[in-house]
Amino acid sequence: MSSLTCTDLSLTYPGGTRALHRVSLAAADGEFLALVGPSGSGKTSLLRAIAGFVQPDAGTITLGETTVSGADAWVPPERRGLGMVFQQHAIWPHWSVGRNVDYPLRRTGLAATERRRRTEHALELVGLAEYRDRNPATLSGGQRQRVALARALAARPRVLLLDEALSALDEPLRAAMRVEIRMLAEREGLTVVHVTHDREEALAVADRVAVLNHGALQQVGTPQELVEDPATSFVASFLADATLLDVVPAGDELRLRTGGHRVPVGVVRTMSADGPDGARADAPAGTRADAPAGADADGPGSARADDSGSAARPAPGHVLAVLPEEVRLRADPEGEGHVESSLFTRTGAQVQLTWHGQPLQARVPERGLRRGDRVDVRVGRALLYGGAGVATAP
Ligand code: ADP
Ligand code: MG
């Protein structure tokens, strides 16, 4: 059974910013779902809509069997039975830890003994059992964040919503808390929606990851599915640092749209579509009012959420996503790659190149490359987005 179902949610703020566009997403009972996307992609807006702090213009939100938000349904936030933890813990500094955790329970009218039992249990869950009478000012940032978590858990929420709850913590504490939250969720069978802009965190903790961009869902899948089968070039770029090349198929080859240089790629994997809604790839190219691929050809930062499209739009471009791990470099004074920088990594170097006027990112085992070096560039395997017609030259 799904604990949480969002269907076709759209949200536009007064002033006209469209924060969510037809988002459909479900979290199963006991599932740990991560919601990841760049800043401004609509993550907080989606959580706020689920929590009931904003009202979507369209779509429905269902918790268990109950529709809490829809055309003719509205359940106020305090009656949705959700727990929420934000990046900046809203802990009352002049109250003890225990009183902070107890505070929301008081408002539910629970008996004092039951409240005390729940407060103690929640503090135990987050490892703060001995801190009940402490002043929060005497706690570390990580401990204060645990107080916020205990407070959310004490109310026994149907779904726990975390909005960048770990983002304010420094490493290595953040990594440790990641593990703790994941274990706690498993032990308690919690349903969690964990919002983060941190890709590694999302992939590490979640059963499934949902990727948002410009208010539209790009892909929902297991971490492995996302990494191995990015549904859109945006996902490839955002989750795997792929370089996106605007290319034109020419016979068996792929050429850069600008300059026409052949891309030296071994294996090309053709992906079926490149849009937040895979079904759109079935529509004839160039006639889709909101065809996203043309916009996406501009690169990961391109605006694809505008509504200005019309039948006059150009046919979707072909975008080749080159994963940094697939780039092979060989020192060569005649080579067409120019090393811009080479940064140390645990497994080698992260190299930033310019190649035919195009920035290109590589992760290679050799650490000896220096700024100004010239290299020969090959690509082992790359992903081609852009729908039908890839095999034929235009
Ligand atoms: P994220 O959490 O992914 O960074 P948000 O949901 O906060 O993104 O924001 C999505 C978009 O909505 C952004 O363009 C942001 O500027 C806009 N936005 C967020 N909150 C408001 C608001 N209260 N009023 C108007 N625009 C807002
Ligand atoms: Mg946010």
Image (cartoon, rainbow, N blue to C red):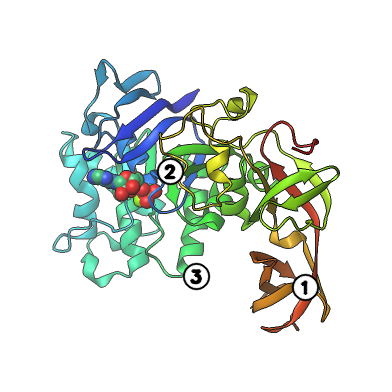
Q: Which mark is residue 172?
A: 3
Tell me what residue is drawn at x 70 percent, y 61 percent.
Answer: 324
Residue 204 in the image, given as x and y percentages of width and height: 58, 53
Residue 245 in the image, given as x and y percentages of width and height: 66, 54
- Asked if labels 3 and 2 touch by Cβ distance under 8 angstroms, the answer is no
* Pointer 3 local density, CA inside 10 Å: few below 14, some 14–19, many at least 20: few
Q: Which mark is residue 365?
A: 1
**Image quarter for residue 39?**
bottom left
Task: Kindly tell me whether residue 122 is visible in this rendering.
Answer: no
* Pointer 2 local density, CA inside 10 Å: few below 14, some 14–19, many at least 20: many
Mark 2 / mark 3, whichever is N-terminal: 3
Mark 1 / mark 3, whichever is N-terminal: 3
SS for dot 3: loop
* Pointer 1 local density, CA inside 10 Å: few below 14, some 14–19, many at least 20: some
Residue 77 in the image, given as x and y percentages of width and height: 24, 33
Relative side of 127 to 172, left or right: left
- Asked if labels 3 and 1 touch by Cβ distance under 8 angstroms, the answer is no
Q: Which mark is residue 214?
A: 2
- Amino acid found under the numbered disc labelled 2: His
Q: As displayed, is residue 74 above or below residue 108?
A: above
Tell me what residue is drawn at x 28 percent, y 57 percent.
Answer: 89
Relative side of 147 to 361, left or right: left
The C terminus sits in image quarter: top right
Q: As displayed, is residue 345 above or below residue 319?
A: below
